[in-house]
Structure formats: C-alpha cells, structure tokens
Amino acid sequence: MSPRCILVLLCVAVAVYKPVFAVGTPAGTSIFNSATVNFELDGEPGTGSSTDQFSVAEIIDVAVIWQDAADLETASPDTNRVLTFLISNIGNGVETFSLQVNNRAPDTDDFDPDTARIFIDGNGNDLFDGAAADPEYLPGTNDPLLDANGQNQITVFVMNSVPSGQANGVIGGSQLLALSTTTGAAGSAPGTGFAGLGDGGVEAVAGATSADGNAVGRYLIALIASPVTLTKTASVIANDRGCDTPPCTPRPGATIRYTIEADVTAVPVAALVITDPVPANVTYVANSIRVDAVPQTDARDNDPGRFAADTVNVNLGEVTSAATYAITFDVTID
Amino acid sequence: MNNRNTANITRAALCALLPALMIATTADAANVKLTSVVEKEVVTTTADGVDVTEIVPAATVIPGEEVIYTTYYNNKSNQVADKIVITNPVPQNTRYKANSAIGADTEITYSVDRGNTFAAPEALMVTDKNGEQRVAWPSEYTHILWAYEPVLPPGKKGNVQFRVVLR
C-alpha cells in the first residue's frame, strides 16, 4: 500500500522536522514493530502478522556553558588568564566538535581580550594544570569527540591576555564556540537533514542548537588602588625685584617653592617614600625641605627629609591612619 | 466469542501471543492478510509561505518525533472472517500517544502488562513507587488491541492506526 501524499505543485524549500531538544534513543537503533491478527474463517482459527522498521536518526546538538562562578578579576595589562568552559553533547550520537575563540564577542563589552589559546582538560579534574596535563588545542588534531550516550562532556580552558589601559570595573568578554564537524551541520537550520552522515550511516539532523554552541566568559578589571595620591604645585615666592609675596615674576634668581601634597587614603602603607628630582635650570636651596612646615636637614639623619644626588627624598615610614602630608622645598632659577 | 468483556479479550490476547501454534493450523495463504507501515508527518512551506503537511514513510526518525503506525487488513479468502482481533505492541524506545488509536468498527483496549491483559483506559491500573494503585498513563501502555466487531466478508478490507513518540 503506497503512503498517502498530499502534494502541492509549488512546494519549495526544505522539509522541516519539529525541533526537539533532548538526548534520546541512541542514533542508529532499529525500531521494529510486528502487528498480529487472529480471526476465524468458517470456524477455523487463523493468524497473520506483518512487520515494519525504522532507524533512529542522529540528532546533533551541543551546549557550551561558562563555568567560572564570577567574572575573573584581572589587572590591566595582564597575561595568561584562564576561563573555564564545559562542552556537552546533548544529541543522541557520537560527534566530533571543532573549537574557536572569538574575543570580539560580545559587541557590548568594554574591551577585547587577546592572544587567545585553548587547552583541553587532559586529566579530568576541571582545573587548568598547565599544558603538560591539559594539552593545547590544535584544530583538526585534537577536536573533542563526545558520545551523547557515554562520555558526553569535556572541560575546555581559554587563556587570554588583557590589554593595558583598562579602567577599574570594566568588562572584557571571550567567546568559546563548539561546532559539529559533520559537514554542513554547524549553523544549519534546526531540522536540516544530512543523508548518511549520522552514526552508522543513518541520517544526521541538526537539532535545536543548529549543531553548534557558544558561551561568553568574562574578565573584570580590578586594579589594586594606589593608597597614595600625589599633587604637585609650584609658586614663585620671591625675586630680586623686591617681590616677596607670590605670585612673583619668574626671573633668574627668583625663588620657586614646590609643594607636594601626599594624600594617603588606604592604610596601612608599609614604607611610604616620596622622591622628586630637582628639574633642570634651577638650583636647590639647601636645607629647604619642610614636611608639614617642619624644617628638614638635607643630611641623612633622624628626620624624614634628605637631599642627595639632586633629589628630594622624604621617608614617611609606616603610615597607619589616613592623612595628608605637605612637603615643600625651594629652588632658585638659574 | 460474542461478548467483548475483559476476560474474553484476555483469551484473544493469549491467542495473539501464540502465533507459532496457530500458523500450523492455517494451511491456506488466502486468509486475512496484514500489512504494516510506519509513517510520519512532514511539514513543507510553499513559496507563498503556506504550511503543507505530507505523510511520508518513516525511514529515519529523531528522538521526540511522532510516527504513525497503520495496520491494513484484507480478507483475501473466499470466506467470511470473524472474531478478528488485531494487536500491536508499543515499540521499544517509544511511548504511546494518548487517544491516537483509531479503527472503524473496532473496540480498542490497552495493556500495561506486556499483553497479558487488556482493558479500557479507566480500568488499567498500575502500582506507583509509593505502592499505591493508580490509573495507568498512556505512556505506560505496552500493547493495543482492536477487536473488529462485525464480520469481514471476502475481499473487504480496512485499517487500524495509532501514533507513538520516539523517546
């Protein structure tokens, strides 16, 4: 008996299966059915049967999930920072997947990580232990092979660098993609069939994931904040024309007073030393260093201030409570 | 076997499970012949964006897809056939789709005990994991039985059908 077909002459394009999303009966399984009939013909019992069969196609589906519990904190710049991903074959057959990193994705992040390298978890502990235990991924040589009905998951590490110049709190995303290596499958519309390309030669069908998957891992810039902020100002405080109240006209022989404000906000600071080389074209006025208006000697002695090798040096030692220090010193214009 | 109560259906089911013995008593090839087909629905979209449903043979099926089993029967003998009972198991790795069994002039019953007994849905009981009895779910049916009520004259034919979903 031929199957009933409803055909419209303008039928176009691809037959679409209802998309499904599950690991199911293994690909290649033969499903048999026998119908049986019992009857009587003129009182004589009789029986009959008939059998039909279909095969289970391979459905190709893959999921990639980023594993780190939170955005990975990094400096800027930074190197060799590893994100962890889990790749799962959620179809019903055996499938090989090729891997790629796209650091431009997503468009919405603040910066792009770079110099991506991929490593495959070789010792099964879901931790990156270096390339000896977790070999580097080379496309076409160690594409992960996952059996939906057996070993169906693998942990993969993506190692990136973080560029310089990123501000505290900004985010950079790194996308790992896994694509079925069955020809034509990755990215095809769910339900697209590939005759003969499934396990054991059955049909392969792209599942709801389009036979590929991806996830984005995130880096968060977390700079160690400087505990000290320095602000430097200069003022001409006297000259040879009788000016002794700033601002005086700068002329050869005029005196410039430099003020460095050191604002300590995060304490304790173990050994705070502020240095300032004397600029060109001026001459340091001996013993002019003051710390919070307290005069300092140039010599290395018990007070914080010292002058040597043309450099002002103030050693504030351990700072245990937040404070602002005013350091001044004078020079004359050559 | 004119009553269609559960006990008689049980006997019919037992007969259905012993085809080897029965074949020995049926010498002629001209009898009630069965043909089974398995098919599925495929939706295609025309150039105008209209969805058209076709029934096609099910060669390969993906988990979650529905397949349609149709059993055609045909009295190819020159005698009237009666007491016709057709049974189909719900195949391995599939589950019966509720209310999908059909067949003109048949009374349909189901089994949850691998074809030992058959009954109407509301009379099929299973024991759940708490040890309590409850009415069986369609997904727990193991067999379906169609009892064709009239006699089937020579040359007359018909079909019964049911659907399953591939796990």
Image (tube, coloured by chain):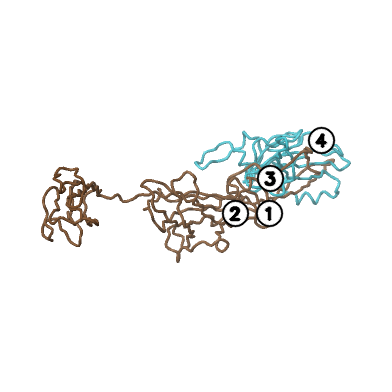
Chain colours: A brown, B cyan
Q: SS for tag 1?
A: loop
Q: Chain of mark 2?
A: A
Locate residue B112 relative to residue A38 in the image: left or right.
left
Tag shown at residue A180: 2
Q: Which residue is mark 4?
A: B151
The one nearer the camera, A110 or A213, is: A110
- What is the x, y in percent for residue B155? 87, 39
Locate residue B54 relative to residue B26 in the image: left or right.
left
Locate residue A322 relative to residue A218 in the image: left or right.
left
The amino acid beneath tag 2 is: Ser
Q: Which residue is mark 1?
A: A202
Look at 61% across and 49% down and name the residue there. A187
Look at 53% across and 52% down and name the residue there. A177
Q: CA distance from mark 3 to mark 1?
A: 24 Å
- What is the x, y in percent for residue A328? 17, 50
- What is the x, y in percent for residue A259? 20, 48
- Label 1 packing within 10 angstroms: few (<14), some (14-19), many (20+): many
Q: CA distance from mark 1 to mark 2?
A: 16 Å
Looking at the image, is mark 4 or mark 3 earlier in the sequence?
3
Can residue A330 be seen by looking at this rendering?
yes
The one nearer the camera, A252 or B133, is: A252
The amino acid beneath tag 1 is: Val
Residue B10 occupies which quadrant of the picture? Answer: top right
Q: SS for tag 4?
A: loop
Q: Are marks 4 and 3 on the same chain?
A: yes
Look at 14% across and 51% down and name the residue there. A290
